[in-house]
Image (cartoon, rainbow, N blue to C red):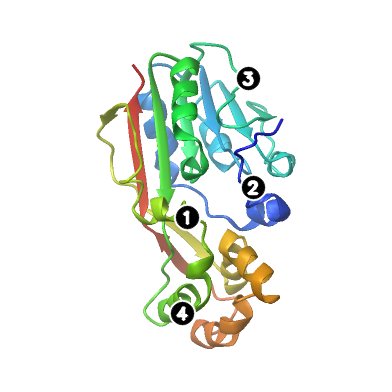
Amino acid sequence: MSDAGFKDHFSRHAADYRAFRPDYPPGLFAFLSSAAPATDLAWDCGTGNGQAAVGLAGHFARVFATDASAQQVANAEAHPRVEYAVAPAERCPLPDASADLVTVAQALHWFDLDRFYAEVRRVCRPGGLIAVWTYDFHSVNPEVDPVLDRLQQEFVRPYWPAERALVDSGYRDLPFPFDELPVPRFGMTAAWSLRHLLGYMNTWSALRRYEEAHGSNPLDRIRGALAAVWGDPAAVRAVTWNFTLRLGRVG
């Protein structure tokens, strides 16, 4: 199933997306399950490689995970309590009033919000929750960060889709027409080698657009400088992101 409004920035690199994207905070899914009215069914919308869906499966009896990209779904991580389906965010195959929780991980800014929110209201059971989260650019340490900033400022910034501004603002500027609930603060970190960091950055949609415009990968422009400040390429370093969660009760 496809949708005319679907902006597909990730299908061509779906396997890399699964291999290199960071994991979400481990306490996130336990918190969401404790806040939901029940733990029978969660709908993970825009599931991508299934990271959030598999995290939810540790706390919900069933997870229904959808994405408009068939390639992303084909590369998603299998789990016995996760059912994957190719479907746009605005048309979910679930029946009315069936889901206890709807989640959207780092994808809400791509959706037609009015249509998606209407679908959330249809799919959620009374008192169900919607949880959406996002994370911004990563940080490593004072030596590495200036090289990462150079990649962003000198090369890729003009090539981000307009929707990226909603991520940069931590979804604060994004409409969220639900009764918003307080949430704890979560930290998002990873322990990565240089290879993994480069693989992650190579999944960015802005890099693909830069390549299309210039015929080269902007990572090649900073690879030497990054290797020099990283040191041993096999060395594992802490990578951090600012993580923002919004939680609402569906009327």
Furthest toward the left, the residue is: 182
Q: Mark 4, mark 2: which one is toward the viewer?
A: 2
Precedes in sequence: disc 2 or disc 1: 2
CA distance separating discs 1 and 4:
20 Å
Q: Position of residue 108 (x, y in %)?
A: 47, 40
Q: Position of residue 187 (x, y in %)?
A: 36, 52
Query: Residues under labels 4 and 3: Cα distance?
Result: 44 Å
Q: Earlier in the sequence, mark 1 or mark 4?
A: 4
Crowd band around label 3 with a 10 angstrom C-alpha radius: few (<14), some (14–19), many (20+): few
For residue 93, the mark is: 3
Marks 3 and 2 sit apart, C-alpha to C-alpha, by 20 Å
Q: Mark 1 = which residue?
A: 162
Q: Single out the mark in the foreground, 3 or 2.
A: 2
Q: Secondary structure at mark 2?
A: loop
For marks 3 and 1, give the one nearer the viewer.
1
Residue depicted at 61% across the width and 58% down the height:
20
Q: Which residue is mark 2?
A: 8
Secondary element at tag 3:
loop
In the rendered image, residue 125, in percent from the top left (x then y), is placed at: 44, 13
Q: Is residue 226 visible?
A: yes
Query: In the shown orientation, is residue 118 left or right of residue 84?
Result: left
The residue under the point 64% across, 54% down is 17
Of 181 and 112, which appears nearest the observer? 112
Q: Quadrant of residue 145?
A: bottom left
Q: Which mark is residue 150?
A: 4
Q: Tell me the amino acid under the disc marked 1.
A: Ala
Which quadrant: the N terminus? top right
Type of amino acid under label 4: Arg
**x, y percentage for residue 43?**
53, 26
